Amino acid sequence: MSSGKCAAGIAAVLMLAGIAVGSDAVHKELHFKVGKHPMVSINNTYGPIVVKAGGDHEVSVLALLHSDKVELDQSKSHNRVDITTHLLPGADGKSGLVEYEVLVPPEASITLHSDNGRLRVEKLRGDIILAGNDGPIDVTDCAQGHVHVRTLTGPISLTNVHGHVEIMSVGGNVIMHGVSGTLVAVNSNSGRIEYDGDFGEEGEYAFTSHTGNIEAVAPAYASIDVLARSTNGSVQSDFSLEPRHAPFILKGANSLAGTLGKAASSVKLFSFSGKILLKKRQN
């Protein structure tokens, strides 16, 4: 394929993905042959990274560079692919912007970083490490691997994710729908934590905030062992829990401890001043 046709093809794909193509944009297309369980790392100072499941033995990268003030550094060693956005002298948040759309094998393990861009991952089965500052982070339809997310103020959304999940946020809200696993741990300073799932897989669910509210919604058939406490906030539950001993003194509307069903999963909800709600899903 000629370079002109290749660039036109890349532009068409990026436009379909909702990525704006300016007149000064530079298009890059990279392909890497990989084996089973490859590791892919992308470090992007400015701009989004979207990663989806693709073919079994190839990593494909479509990149839109917004100016000639930025380059892509790439390397492949054995079964690992590393891509880094390289800012040239004079680059800033606008001229240094790079937008990535990446296809990887479903079982690939990935590490993504962007200072201000959106990070989105879909339909993977490997380990996922995502780090951002103020850009949104989305993980959808991923299972079997470990998911580690770290951000400052960017909102975090997990949908239909099953595995080992650990999230740390300073001020971003954390929203989870259909998330389950052996461990689902969320720690936020001021952001809101929302969970809507079934607390399944005999897991440990630990949601902790300092000033943010915590809301957990579960079905009537949930099998949970609950400990909840807010030092300066309130704790409310829609469930009729069987009382149990707690490792702390239960104080009126500030804490609760109890079990539901066979208490297969441990649920711990702690906040310093946020409000805690354990709600029964309305079918």
Image (cartoon, rainbow, N blue to C red):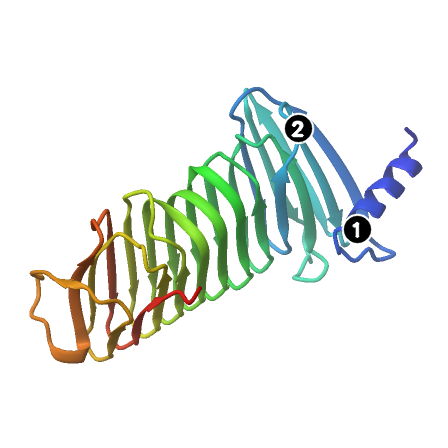
* Circle 2 SS class: loop
| Of the image marks 1 and 2, the number of the one nearer the N terminus | 1
Q: Is residue 253 above or below residue 247?
A: below
* x and y, in percent, of residue 14 in the image: 78, 49
**Residue at 50% of width from left, 64% of height from top?**
155
* Label 2 packing within 10 angstroms: few (<14), some (14-19), many (20+): few
Residue type, mark 1 in image: Leu
* x and y, in percent, of residue 9 in the image: 86, 40
* Circle 1 SS class: helix
Query: As drawn, is 269 to the left or to the right of 31?
Result: left
Q: Nearer the viewer, residue 89 or 28?
A: 28
Quadrant location of the C terminus in the rendered image: bottom left
Q: Is residue 106 above or below residue 225?
A: above
Q: Nearer the viewer, residue 283 or 63?
A: 283
Query: As drawn, is 277 to the left or to the right of 257?
Result: right
Q: Nearer the viewer, residue 108 or 195?
A: 195
Residue type, mark 2 in image: Gly
Query: As drawn, is 50 to the left or to the right of 154?
Result: right
Query: Cα distance, mark 1 to mark 2?
Result: 20 Å
Identify the mark at residue 55; answer none if there is no mark: 2
**Residue at 64% of width from left, 45% of height from top?**
86
* x and y, in percent, of residue 74 in the image: 64, 34
Q: Which residue is mark 1?
A: 16
Q: Nearer the viewer, residue 1 or 140?
A: 140
**Residue at 35% of width from left, 73% of height from top?**
212
